[in-house]
Image (cartoon, helix red, strand yellow):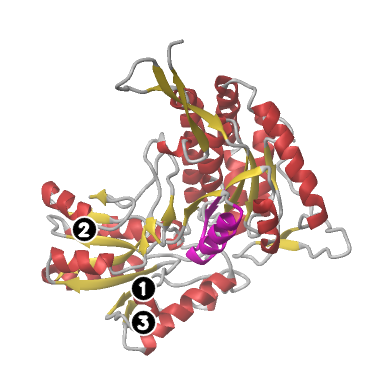
Amino acid sequence: MTSTSIQPMSATGPDAEPFHSINPYSGETLGEFPYLEIEQLDAVIDRAHAGFEQWRERSAQERAGVVSRAAELVRERADDLAHTISAEMGKLVGEARWEIQVSADILRYYGDNGPRFLEPEQLDIAEGGDARVVYEPLGVLLGIEPWNFPLYQVVRLAAPNLVAGNTILLKHTSTCPVTALKIEWIFADAGAGEGVYTNIFLRTRDVERVIAHPSVQGVALTGSDAAGAAVAEQAGRHVTKCMLELGGNDPFIVLDSADLESTVDMAVQGRMFNTGQSCVASKRFFVPEAMHDRFVEALAARFSDYTPGDPTDPETTLGPLSSDEAADDLLEQMQDALDKGARAVVGGGRPPESERGPGGSRAFVQPTVLTGVTPDMRAFSEELFGPVAVVHQVGDADEAVRMANDSPYGLGATIVSTDIEAAQQVARRIESGMVWINTPTLTQADLPFGGVKRSGFGRELSRLGMYEFVNRKLVRTVPA
């Protein structure tokens, strides 16, 4: 199945309610898709389990070869994938190409290194004989993935677990069904057999039925903390292993700066990539009093330079959010702050209708810098999933750390300083899963990714990502 066009489908069944893929820029309906009916679920899960029984018997090298081939196919289909992602969720096409390259790198990383990660680990023990840990697959896994990085989030889960010998049922967001189907095709064309990787258009209300199935041994979710709490509760009820990567309200702490312009460059990159729709985007900026006003002025000037438009046009620098609803939610959070006394130095609403394309898309939000945000405002503690930066003036590093940690989230953080030792000391005090010094929080295949507190638990990527859904079995041999 290598076709790059999607034909609209009709839902079937007595309770069929199709959903639609809608371009947030143009409003065009890209396709109509049927949900999987509940009476079909057991058969789909049974196929995934049957696929597991065969897939696990293939060597790790063979499985890695399929994943490596998927990396090649992602690169070969990059142009089509980039335009599909851009059309479905509004990502700038250049940023979609970056996502595709990173995704191919992750697939290649596990194709190259996965078998080595799965080699038995010899233990150094006090008594005689042999003791080792062997790594074995668990079985069928359910993945629940979001729209903001619709390819990257999937391969982050799929690549290590397919090499490990698990099989995947993937519930993608209803925002990106075309992308979801094309990912399934990539794994099929790469040589994964039937049931090894299966896309399922699953209603949220049917998720627990999958988690409860005895063949399903794990569930991974990337999404909001509310969704994570619901899935964790269901997984706990059925004693099913789960891994959660949830929201973030990442701090960007400036300790000092020899070059204000480069610091602002980092701030813009950290806040505005993917139109700010990233769990690890820098969202709260803590800046010393001596440079606060200059930082705000420079950041606001950069934000005002963004040009809204068609995300497939290389000249466009501001794409729409993923939907009208996402924009409405963000504007409500901002308005709450403004009503309670915060100041929008720049932005604060939607761009003029004339700048939002031929249909006047309501999914656009102006890049906004908020100051004067206080704890009684939603923008103080809630994740702002879009192009909105909250800047706080702080007296010293201790105040910055205290405010940074005053959050239910703990995903990523950025620290800027010319004094690396001081930055590393502050990094150890930050309550988060990741800290990046003198660069915005990024991602790469060989670095672990994950958070603490309400940002979830477990790690993806790197060697650690290989072990979330494997049985780390001890085999102890004593001489006869």
116 or 75: nearer the eye? 116
Percent of width and height locating residue 224: 50, 63
Q: Nearer the viewer, mark 1 or mark 2?
A: 1
* Residue at the spot of label 1: 381
Label 1 amino acid?
Answer: Ser
Which residue is at the front of the view, 410 or 308? 410
Q: What stretch is highlighted in magenta?
A: 219-238
| Residue at 29% in and 59% down | 267
* Viewer-closest of 167 and 75: 167
Q: Marks 1 and 3, Cα distance to the nearest angstrom?
A: 8 Å
N-terminal of the two: label 1 or label 2?
2
What residue type is disc 3 on? Met
Q: Is residue 160 left or right of residue 167?
A: left
**Label whose residue precedes the other's in the sequence (2 or 3):** 2
Image: 306 above or below 134: below
Label annotation for residue 261: 2
**Of 366 and 454, the residue lying toward us:** 454
Q: Which quadrant of the structure image shows residue 124?
A: top left
Tell which residue pokes out farthest to the top in this image: 480
Give the residue number, with chain letter if any, for mark 3. 377
Query: In the rendering, which numbered label is found on residue 213?
Result: none
